[in-house]
Amino acid sequence: MAQQGAAERRVRLNRDRVLAAAVALADEIGIEALSMRRLAQELGVVPMALYKHVQNKEELLDGMVEVIIGEIDPPVQDVEWKSAVRHRVLSARRTLQRHPWARQAIESRTTKTPIVLQYMDSFTGMLLDGGFSADLAHHAMHAIGGRMWGFTQELFDESAGSKPEASAEPSPAEQAAMLQYIGERYPNLFTIATSSNHDGSVVAHGCDDQFEFEFALDLLLDGFERRHEQGWSPTRAHANHC
């Protein structure tokens, strides 16, 4: 009976089920621990059964990125371009927050699959549909960068795409000593670090990541809007610097 059950599971196996299981498993254990053997065990099949649907782990990761893209909201219709871009970027960010491993997977892809290219194309389309010139849209896409996928390279990231290990809460005396050290040796960093509320402690908690993400996104969108309204062109921009 056990063999019959396993055979039935293998019959029902398809690429979508493999990818969905891989995403769920990566959510649980991360992509470093994810392997074809571990995924096969999760699905109750022999590892060779997976190779009918994905050739190797790299192809598996390509497919998992496609699943993630499928969770991002499509472009909003009948709204001005800035709202459409902002909505989609924040939808991508919510998606990556549900799947902490996804940023690492996206950054590791060396080949753009059709679904990745389709996503990038539709993102560019929001700018072009908003009346951007091809040149301005091109530079805007460079400026948006990873925000298109819902992440950015934060100034004080300890390791991109991964969560630092938990550490002991510093004592008030240790926090005070650290602040004094920073203030004496890095006065400019000290100035910006102490300019805003950091949940009570600059050292212990750091910046409000969501606020900083949205703040930078809005700055970019406002800048794009001004250049669009000014009829920006690379020729004019170059002339202004001569």
Image (cartoon, rainbow, N blue to C red):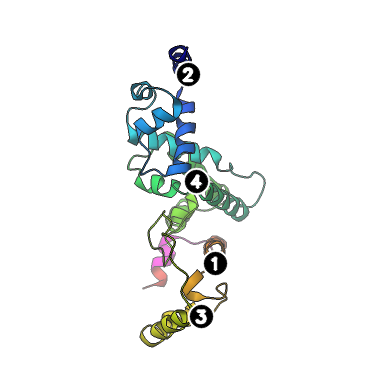
Element at label 1:
loop
Residue nearest the viewer, comparing 213 with 87: 213
Sequence order check, earlier mark of 4 and 2: 2
Per the rendering, the mark at residue 208 is: 1
Q: Which residue bears the numbered disc 4?
A: 99
Per the rendering, the mark at residue 194 is: 3
Question: Which contiguous range is marked in magenta?
Answer: 231-238
Sequence order check, earlier mark of 3 and 4: 4
Mark pair 3, 1: CA separation: 13 Å
Mark pair 3, 2: CA separation: 57 Å
Q: Is residue 122 visible?
A: yes
Residue nearest the viewer, comparing 198 with 164: 164
Q: Residue at x 57, y 53 (%)?
A: 90
Q: Position of residue 127 (x, y in %)?
A: 53, 50
Element at label 4:
loop
Q: Position of residue 177 (x, y in %)?
A: 42, 84
Magenta segment: does it hold 237?
A: yes
Residue type (three-letter) at the residue carrying disc 4 = His
Q: Which residue bears the numbered disc 2?
A: 9
Residue type (three-letter) at the residue carrying disc 2 = Arg
Q: Residue at x 54, y 66 (%)?
A: 208
Question: How many C-alpha atoms fall within 10 Å of the one at disc 4: few (<14), some, or many (≥20)?
Answer: some
Mark pair 3, 4: CA separation: 32 Å
